[in-house]
Amino acid sequence: MWIHPSPSDLPAYHEALVAHLRHEIHRGHGTVSEPSGVRRWVGRQLVRVGTRLAADPTMRPVRSL
């Protein structure tokens, strides 16, 4: 539950919030996380599909005779 800080507590609340956000931002640096592996896998699948579509003769442009 989120409670609004009183005006006298606002500077301390702000400092705590900034410290928490900095900690969250810098927490995962330097490690290989699961989402990057998923992104890499999806990227490879898109490249494979694109390669198959490019090789498909029915996808080539029609030329006038």
Image (tube, rainbow, N blue to C red):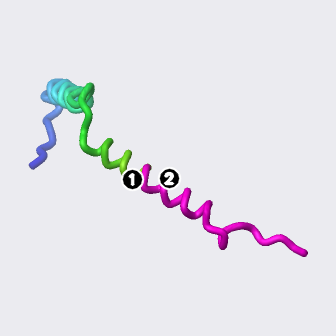
Residue 17 location in percent, x, y? 19, 31
User: First in sequence: mark 1 or mark 2?
Assistant: 1
Q: Residue furthest left?
A: 1
Residue 26 location in percent, x, y? 25, 26
Residue 27 location in percent, x, y? 20, 29
Task: Name which residue lies at 87% across and 73% down.
Answer: 64
Amino acid under disc 2: Val
- Quadrant position of residue 58: bottom right
Residue 40 lies in the magenta-colored region: no
Magenta segment main secondary structure = helix
Task: Name which residue lies at 13% across and 29% down.
Answer: 9
Q: Residue furthest right?
A: 65
Measure how far apart labels 1 and 2 are at the Cα level.
9 Å
Task: Name which residue lies at 16% across and 27% down.
Answer: 16
Question: Which quadrant of the figure contains the C terminus?
Answer: bottom right
| Number of numbered discs visible in the structure rendering | 2
- Quadrant position of residue 25: top left
Task: Residue 47: give its label.
Answer: 2
Residue 60 lies in the magenta-colored region: yes
- Quadrant position of residue 29: top left
Amino acid under disc 1: Val
Query: Range of the magenta residues?
Result: 44-65
The residue labelled by disc 1 is: 42
For marks 1 and 2, give the one nearer the viewer. Answer: 2
Residue 21 location in percent, x, y? 23, 31
